[in-house]
Image (cartoon, helix red, strand yellow):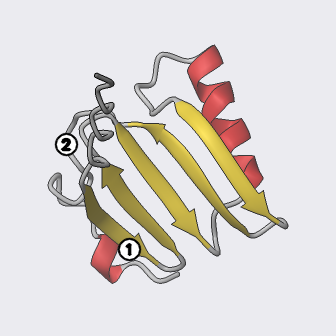
Amino acid sequence: MDQEEPPPPPPAPLEVLSRQSGATFTRWGSLFVIKSGDRVRPSEEYAMRLVRQYTSVPIPNPVSFEFKGQSVGEIRMSYVQGITLEICGFPWKTMQS
């Protein structure tokens, strides 16, 4: 008697963390964050890799990325636990684009 394989696990839950003028930050499960939108550029992924390589600043590790042209993209990165600048009192709401 052949047994059926169990169904795949459900995808990790998504939680929108922030929307900031053309970019959405979405937490995917407990390990990843996705930054997507029309202001996500390839230079961000390169900058993240440089900062990780040459400094000790705790930033996310870019896991994968996809870009359509130079101004629309998605960067999937590791989640870094910490305190947001907003909680620290950084005036995000009053800053102009």
Depth order, front residue of 94/29:
29
Q: Compared with residue 73, is residue 6 higher up or lower down, i.e. above or below? A: above
Where residue 28 sits: x, y (%)? 33, 49
> Left or right: 95 with respect to 69?
left
* First of labels 1, 2 by sequence position: 1
Depth order, front residue of 71/87:
71
Amino acid residing under circle 2: Ile
Disc 2 residue crowd, few under 14, some 14–19, many 20+, Cα 10 Å: few
Name the disc covering residue 2, or none.
Answer: none
Depth order, front residue of 21/10:
10
Q: Residue at x 28, y 47 (%)?
A: 12
Amino acid residing under circle 1: Arg
Q: Compared with residue 14, is residue 6 higher up or lower down, i.e. above or below? A: above
Q: Alpha-carbon distance for marks 1 and 2?
A: 17 Å
Callout 1 secondary element: strand
Q: Compared with residue 89, is residue 61 higher up or lower down, i.e. above or below? A: above
Callout 2 secondary element: loop
Name the disc covering residue 83, or none.
Answer: 2
Q: In terms of image quadrants, where is residue 54?
A: top right
Where residue 78 sits: x, y (%)? 42, 33
Frontmost of labels 1 and 2 is 1
Where residue 33 sits: x, y (%)? 39, 47
Q: Quadrant of the N terminus?
A: top left
Q: Residue at x 27, y 34 (%)?
A: 6
Q: Which residue is mark 1?
A: 19
Q: Residue at x 68, y 27 (%)?
A: 50
Q: Compared with residue 8, is residue 44 higher up or lower down, i.e. above or below? A: below
